[in-house]
Image (cartoon, rainbow, N blue to C red):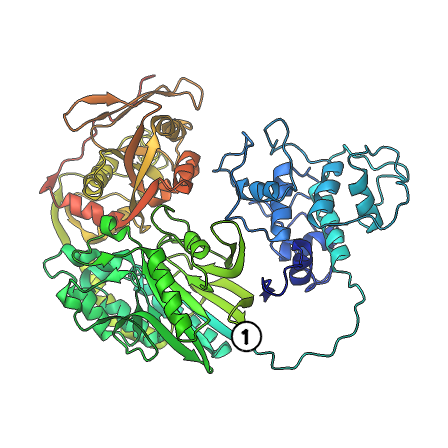
Amino acid sequence: MKKLQNRNKMLGATIAATVAASAFAIAPVGAQTTTFKDVPSTHPQFDAISLLASQGIISGFPDGTYKPNQSLTRGQAAIIIAKALKLDLTNSKDLTFTDVPKSHPYYASIAALSQAGLLEGKDQTFKINDNITRGEVAKLMALSLQLQPKNTDALPFTDVPADYAPYVKALLDNGITSGTSEKTFSTGQGVTRGQAAAFLVRALQAMTTPTPQPTEPPKEANDNTFELSILHSNDTHARVENAPKRATAIKEQRAKNPNSLLLDAGDVFSGTLYFNEFHGEADLKLMNYMGYDVMTFGNHEFDLGSSQEGHQALADFIKAAEFSFASSNVVFSDDAKFTGLFNDLVSSEPEKGKIYSGIVKEIDGEKVGIFGLTTAETVDISSPGSVKFENYIDEANKAVKAFEELGVNKIIALTHIGYDDTAAVDNDVELAKAVEGIDLIVGGHTHTMLEEPVVIDKNAKGEEKDATLIVQAYQYSDYLGTLDVVFDEEGVVVEYAGELIKLGEYADDPGALELLKPYKEKVQSVQNKEIGVTATSVLENPRVSDEGNTTGASVRKNETPLGNLITDGMLAKAKNYTKNEVIMAIQNGGGIRASIGEGPITVGEVITVLPFGNTLALMDVTGAELKAAFETSVEKYPEESGGFLHVSTGTKVQFDSSKPAKSRVVSISYTDASGKEVQIEDNKTYTIATNAFTAKGGDGYDMFAKAYSEGRVTDLGLSDWENLEEYLKTMKEIKPATENRIVDVAK
């Protein structure tokens, strides 16, 4: 387990000492193996590269190589040092380097090191791709690991400038370098990736060399600590066919850690035919079988509020649950369907099938408090009806106070507000900073893959606080999250270990498979159900490589009738979820995976067209960003590109393929509410609709990734194939056609 500093007891500990104690005392050099095909065991830096790779501090290239003889860049060095120091990458100040935008994958590491005073730029730039020199490496390592010269002897090297001398001396005295010769250090010479690994390991070994200490009496075996294991899921979205594997993993983990809680952070509802047909019943049967302890509500649990039956399916789900629900900021009292189900109190004796503001669980004689939060965005992106949502910070403070009055000092927030979603509304990082007393946040909503816990140990003012750990287990029951923590006698987390278990590698649990069987049979029959719409001819999804494709047309470089239908459906749906004018919808061609045959269209065909379970998102972008996006869309033309963007009706994109890439877009326009064609202007901001994959920067759309990181994206969570089915049902008959929405003027 990784140790956390107790702010009341260990204020004097340094970053470097923490890293040395927790990360590198556990594996000696030479004890690891590496799979890099260009680093055989005979390589001079094999041991160093292997050790750092095993610790996740260095990584190779997609082709399976490490390239140990390639020069290390300044950006690569920043990533390595930030990982070695285990710096918090979530609270970094804004960078002033003009060549490192927030969308850059190295941004967080460079910002964290810059904030710590460990990295400097050059003329307001960082020179991210410049090779780092031996002198720069010496300074970076000496400062990062707080290495000091051990004596006042003069340097033997005659080529070291005065500003680098203290750092080179520190490396020399600690046995990290011996120079390039007896008289030279070669300060300005580049460093290879292999040499950098060897430098770093020797530096960390110097840090971990034990210093003799006075003998202390051994601690008693019982040191009043308490160990707890959390197993967690979120955003499973009716992917019940993955649940039997989750059941197997849960049984395995419980056998290892009997002091455990099984928690779900919401959005069990919506996403597949299982929900369309059974409204959560199949999911609940499997959750009961797995023995969940507590669940909170996601925004999609309220999707049926506008249906004729309202929230009856959710009320039935709650009543039939063999576990309790925690919800602190959701007000159910105005909806009669929840009468008798909700208690706005903290309960030490929670009943199954009931909702509580907070729940106290007793585990091995220790009390653990759990409260729940649901995003306020639910009002805009779901159909809560008369269900209301209170301020999440206020309700979290009330919950913590209530637990503390009951003598509970180990507190878990089970949330569906998003890890780093729009900060102005709600998210886990802001919650951890704003509310004292929360030890663990088990989250959902943003479908974030947190491969290890995120530690928040500073409040909103930047002041140190007891650590809050945040975890989230991606989506769709692809993973089971695990978190093992050790609390001290004051309820402060002092050690932790967490990871995501990939469920695809597990066998199905036989009992869960048997429970799933009748639901699966029904769903398979429904897939063949006709939706009541006929295609007069094939809605093609062409690729250049298709046999008989004589025109060279492709969904990945040309407008297609099917792409038009998908984007038109996205636009129609998105307009119902914002007061802003949604000017267009865009869909990446790589996300359209199959054609629809001539004749009656089936549910299965619709799902096959959009099989990835993507969701609809709203995004605010500038005209300049939109233009840059369409430059990316057509930059490979006439070659295929999965990022080629299809556009909705009323949108016109003209480009000139005879021009160089990134300077091809001639014009972009849309049709406004009055029917007038309007040209996009660089400095104006527009609301568009797209899928969540593209909105997060998929297919290389860095400008969208920037918008997402700045909170300008709202994931509506609406299934793309369901949107398409709903739109197709507005038509009795479909006649495939294109409308010159995307035109190459060079032709």
x then y, percent, for residue 421: 38, 48
Q: Is residue 20 above or below residue 513?
A: above
Report if residue 585 is visible in the image: yes
Circle 1 sits on which residue? 489
Report if residue 33 is visible in the image: no
Q: Is residue 95 above or below residue 81?
A: above
Q: Quadrant of the N terminus?
A: bottom right
Q: Which residue is painted at 52% across and 61% down in the image?
A: 467
Q: Which residue is painted at 69% across and 43% down in the image?
A: 193
The residue most toward the front is: 405
Which residue is at the front of the view, 645 or 200?
A: 200
Q: Secondary structure at mark 1?
A: loop
Q: Amino acid at mark 1?
A: Glu
x then y, percent, for residue 450: 47, 56
x then y, percent, for residue 10: 64, 63
Query: Would residue 621 appear left or right of 535 to someone viewing this image?
Result: right
Neighbours of disc 1 within 10 Å: few (<14), some (14-19), many (20+) = few
Q: Which residue is painted at 69% across and 63% down in the image?
A: 27
Q: Is residue 135 above or below residue 321?
A: above
Q: Which residue is painted at 68% across and 54% down in the image?
A: 16
Which residue is at the front of the view, 85 or 482?
A: 85
Q: Quadrant of the C terminus?
A: top left
Which residue is at the front of the view, 458 or 500?
A: 458
